[in-house]
Image: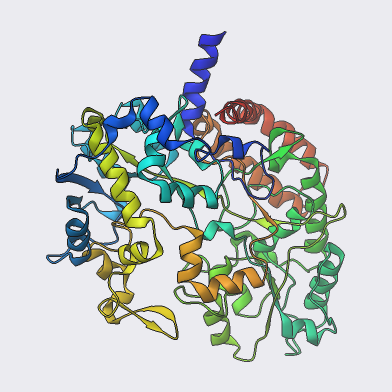
Amino acid sequence: MKKVYLQLCSIFIALLLIISISACNITGTDVDKSIRNTSVENEISEDGYEKYAPIPGKQYTITWTSQQSAPLGDNPEILDYWNEKLDVNIVIWNIENTRYAEILNLKVASGEIPDEMLITSFVNFQKLHDQEMLAKLPEPVIKKYAPDLVKHIENDSLGAFKYAKIDGEIHAIPFIGYNDKFRAAVVWRADWLENVGIKKVPETIDEFEEAFYKFAKEDPDKNNENDTFGLSESAFSAIFGAYGYIPSYCSPIHQGKPMWQLREGKMVFSSVQPEVKEALRKLNKWYMDGVLDPEFITGENKGGPVNITHAFANGRIGYTSHGFYYNWAEENEEVSRNLDELFKSNKDAKLAYGLPPIGPEGIRGVYKRNAILGSFRAIGKHVESEPDKIGKILEVMNALNGTYESWLTCRLGFEGKQWELVDGKVKAIGKYVDPKEVAKLGGHTVLQLLAPFEFMSKYLTKSTAWAIRNQYDKYGIHTELCGALPSEGKYLTELDKIEREAFIAIITGDKPIDYFDEFVEKWKKSGGEQLEKEANEWYEIINQQ
């Protein structure tokens, strides 16, 4: 049995599917699993890890890969600065951004293995491990030579390093997504609310419904035409969330990504939970009453940047959950916004930023992405023969991203050259607004390994403050599992098709509400039961890390 168990561990841990540590916390023992909890000095001295200590005076050449937005230029002054400062020779492999994983795999297959490498998915992480291309990184060594990275990673997602383990051993540094601390948008046309006599932003599912009906029936834009609706597809996420489970079929932004949630300590596929049937009943009613936009099937975006909702911007609907905080923030340093599109069509429009609706059982929530993205920084297996170099690479990683000042230099370059302070805020200068120009110098994602919340919130002070003020850091519902289960390739495409067809048919009335029960049985028999089995086997194993 033990042998079988270990084989299962090897299969399922290696997939490293994510359980995010926010919202519905998976375990109360994450603090015990933190790699910060033991004495670094004692472990280094007692367990023989001193061989990882960088040799003083030795200059290390480190081959390095990253998903660059542009290849290095002839004068990579950011890279040159760090090479001189750290007394190393970092050699960047210029790999085309759009084909990064493909090209890296080809190089590795031909025997070209970088000393330090970016891995962009759990699947590739598993593949490289199985090919014996990744060095083991003992926990005491990471804590000794990259203490600031450990601090930032675990501050942002406690227990994150367990997702970088295969067979109980760490093989990489996990990357945590800053923006994924925040949920999807909840946005109303405030002027429409006023025009139909609603004096406060709706909070409950019944108040949402009242507003939707008024938007569809009472000419909220005052143009004397019957051309408005309450909601379209992006709103589904918040409506389902009011019943506790968000199915994979929700919005164009995340449609088709499996949604797994916890129910009584077990992993369940959200789309087949009985509460989903009640949300579908509500959506069907709204569709039949002309409140739900009949064009919901094709979504709110009609082309161009995917986070833009044209249905909302053009005054067709009065509520949206399309996009994330940075697409809506009224104070925003970097990113294009839905606001720009909206005000092109209606310069007098007013907005209200609310919370997802409270459902009949007091539950509320809207889609949120995982904070752990499935990206890693790893060290090539060949470097194990030179353990002091492993210590040095970790030391370099820590120096590049350990403090806000060093992180900012890696991201943007130098004050007065590539950026300046304007009213106390960092602002790129001239052509360096374009990340590709910074990448040519060795900046942007070339040497920036992390996006710690502490640093990003300082760098993006205005938009972060706006997001927190509007509670975008609350009421997010995320998948507890990300990546690919062993049988997904066999079943998931067909299961997605079955789900989408069933949900559309129920919402539009082509099938009765009770067809949901038939859909659930069909889903289970078409591979769903196998995926649930695999998800729970993974869940049990990952929580023993």
Relative depth, front residue between 286 and 418 = 418
Task: Identify the residue at horizontal 24%, vertical 40% (top origin).
Answer: 54
372 is higher (above) or lower (below) than 517: below
**Numbered marks: total:** 0
Which of the colour schemes (rainbow, by chain, secondary structure, one colour) is used?
A: rainbow
Task: Identify the residue at horizontal 63%, vertical 25% (top origin).
Answer: 533
- The answer to whether residue 309 shows anywhere in this view is no
Q: Position of residue 365 (x, y in %)?
A: 72, 56
Quarter of the image holding residue 220? bottom right
Task: Identify the residue at horizontal 30%, vertical 38% (top origin).
Answer: 379
* Quadrant where the C terminus is found in the figure: top right
Residue 202 in the figure: left or right of residue 53: right
50 is higher (above) or lower (below) than 155: above
Task: Identify the residue at horizontal 33%, vertical 25% (top origin).
Answer: 48
Quarter of the image holding residue 251? bottom right
Quarter of the image holding residue 97? bottom left
Q: Position of residue 308 (x, y in %)?
A: 53, 70
Relative depth, front residue between 192 and 288 = 192
Q: Position of residue 28 (x, y in %)?
A: 68, 38
* Quadrant where the N terminus is found in the figure: top right
Relative depth, front residue between 361 and 236 = 361
